[in-house]
Image (spheres, rainbow, N blue to C red):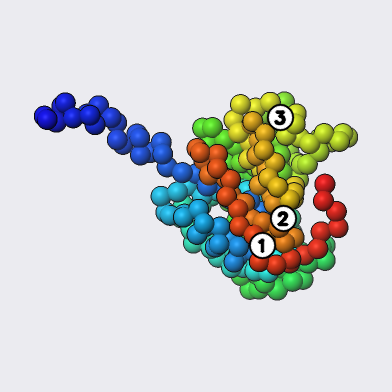
Amino acid sequence: MSPACHPSAGIDWYNLVVSMRRTIIIGDVHGCYAELQDLLRKVDSSQKDRLISVGDLIAKGPDSAAVLDWALRTPNLECVLGNHELRLLDCWRRGRLPDEKPYDAELVGQLGRGFDGYMRRIARWPMVIAGREFLVVHGGFVPGTPPARQDPRLLANLRRLPGTDLPWYDAYRGKRLAVFGHWARKRPVVRDNAIGLDTGCVYGVRLTALVLPQRRLVSVPARRVYRRKQRWG
Ligand SMILES: [Mn+2]
């Protein structure tokens, strides 16, 4: 068979390979370094994948420094800021150490002398990462306002729409898949145009990732309960 007649002629291999590159979006890690590594192994992650964190890599869990060290040395990883990163950055910008949450002393202890260096680097992380077919945010979007005009506090903290019982994602009409964390549930939240990935690893449930474009959810069990959750909802 001459090359021109071969069945593979006419296939744009470059674009095929590029379009098949996976995007792996990782739910709230909260310092659970061992489970993060379990999850990366389970999805068989490589440097060819685009990795994205939904934020809250740190706080509450056993090893926030190991998770941040991993994040900062992983070139194919992008992160949005979670409410905990944002909270620490606020303190850092005011020249203080965080002390408002019961686990802050432990967190400051884990970050140790690295605190300043970590903050300097995570200060560049965005609130939203936009792909062609998805948006990644820690908390959520207020419907009707373009992502660039949203209040950063709400982007990192939103659960229900202000003054209502309505989860923001049930009012979200965007065409792009909104992938978020922050609202710990025992199972991922799955809607046509929104997927919530916080499956409470730090509370002893699971750490979950979303693999795109396949929309496959992959999770690993927490190795233990690092923190008790008062109420699920
Ligand atoms: Mn959060």
Q: Secondary structure at mark 2?
A: loop
Query: Mark 2 or mark 3, which is nearer to you?
Result: 2
Q: Is residue 123 visible?
A: no
Position above or below: 65 against 160: below
Q: Is residue 106 left or right of residue 192?
A: right
State the CA–CA distance, disc 1 to disc 3: 30 Å
**Which dot marks residue 200?**
2
Position above or below: 32 against 214: below
* Residue for badge 1: 222
Residue 193 picture quarter: top right
Neighbourhood count class around disc 3 (C-alpha, 10 Å): few under 14, some 14–19, many 20 upward? some
Q: Secondary structure at mark 1?
A: loop
In terms of depth relative to the viewer, which is nearer, 96 or 230? 230
Say whether disc 1 or disc 3 marks the residue closer to the N-terminus. 3
Query: Mark 1 or mark 3, which is nearer to you?
Result: 1
Q: Residue at coordinates 86% horizontally, 58% vertically from top-left?
A: 230
In terms of depth relative to the viewer, which is nearer, 196 or 190? 190
Q: Are marks 2 and 3 in contact (CB under 8 Å)?
A: no
In terms of depth relative to the viewer, which is nearer, 64 or 167? 167
State the CA–CA distance, disc 2 to disc 3: 23 Å
* Amino acid bearing label 3: Tyr
**Which dot marks residue 231?**
none
Say whether disc 2 or disc 1 marks the residue closer to the N-terminus. 2
Say whether disc 2 or disc 3 marks the residue closer to the N-terminus. 3
Q: Are marks 2 and 1 in contact (CB under 8 Å)?
A: yes
* Residue for badge 3: 172
Image position, residue 83 (x, y; %): 72, 51
Q: Residue at coordinates 67% horizontally, 72% vertically from top-left?
A: 110
Q: Residue at coordinates 85% horizontally, 53% vertically from top-left?
A: 231
State the CA–CA distance, disc 2 to disc 1: 8 Å
Q: Secondary structure at mark 3?
A: loop
